[in-house]
Image (cartoon, rainbow, N blue to C red):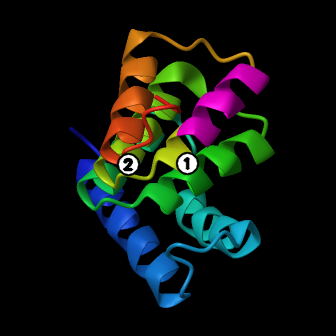
Amino acid sequence: PPGTLDMDSVALSICRDVKLLGLQGRSDDLEVERVLARHMGEIGFEQRRVMHLMQQLGLARECRTSLAVLHSLQNRNLEMGAHLASASIVICGKMSDWRQAVQILRKMADSSVERNTITFNAAVSACEKGQQWVQA
């Protein structure tokens, strides 16, 4: 599809820059927001493009960066949507980052974003991988 290569390049650039800043695993939202604004400003925050970015972040196992994308969308008053949130929860599950998965689930509830079977299953899977049976 048109723009796919551009999105792949943008996703790789975002991952690289976040790692270069030493932000992987830390929550410095302001710096991550700057990286996202710089790169996403080039292509826009259209939902189809953001979903492609989330897929690339999932392949790269970039849980923190995917959360920053969601945060950035909220800062811009753009709809997070169940698909984007679920994608982030799945990424967190791959990383066994159950805390972030539960945090996204809570943000969805706070933002009145519909949670569905896929979302809950992804969150339960993340908790299971992190051996957090009570959270699951």
Give above or below for 53 relative to 80: below
- Name the residue rendered at 69%, 76% in the picture: 31
Q: Which residue is mark 2?
A: 130
Q: Is residue 113 left or right of residue 122?
A: right
Residue 54 in the image: state x and y as whole percent. Answer: 39, 46
Give above or below for 5 relative to 16: above
Q: Which residue is mark 1?
A: 99
Residue 3 in the image: state x and y as whole percent. Answer: 31, 48
Q: Residue furthest front?
A: 134
- Residue density around tag 1, few if under 14, some if 14–19, many if 20 or more, within 10 Å: some
Whole-number angstrom distance, CA of label 2 to CA of label 1:
9 Å
Residue 129 in the image: state x and y as whole percent. Answer: 31, 44
- Secondary structure, mark 1, is helix
Say which amino acid is labelled 2: Gly
Q: Does residue 117 appear in the picture of this structure? A: yes
Q: Is residue 24 left or right of residue 15?
A: right
Residue 133 in the image: state x and y as whole percent. Answer: 42, 34
Say which amino acid is labelled 1: Arg
- Name the residue rendered at 67%, 43% in the picture: 73
Q: Are marks 2 and 1 in contact (CB under 8 Å)?
A: yes
Q: Is residue 70 magenta?
A: no
The magenta segment is 102-111
- Disc number at residue 82? none
**Of label 2 and label 1, which has the lower sequence position?**
1
Q: Is residue 54 left or right of residue 110?
A: left
- Secondary structure, mark 2, is loop
Q: Does residue 51 appear in the picture of this structure? A: no
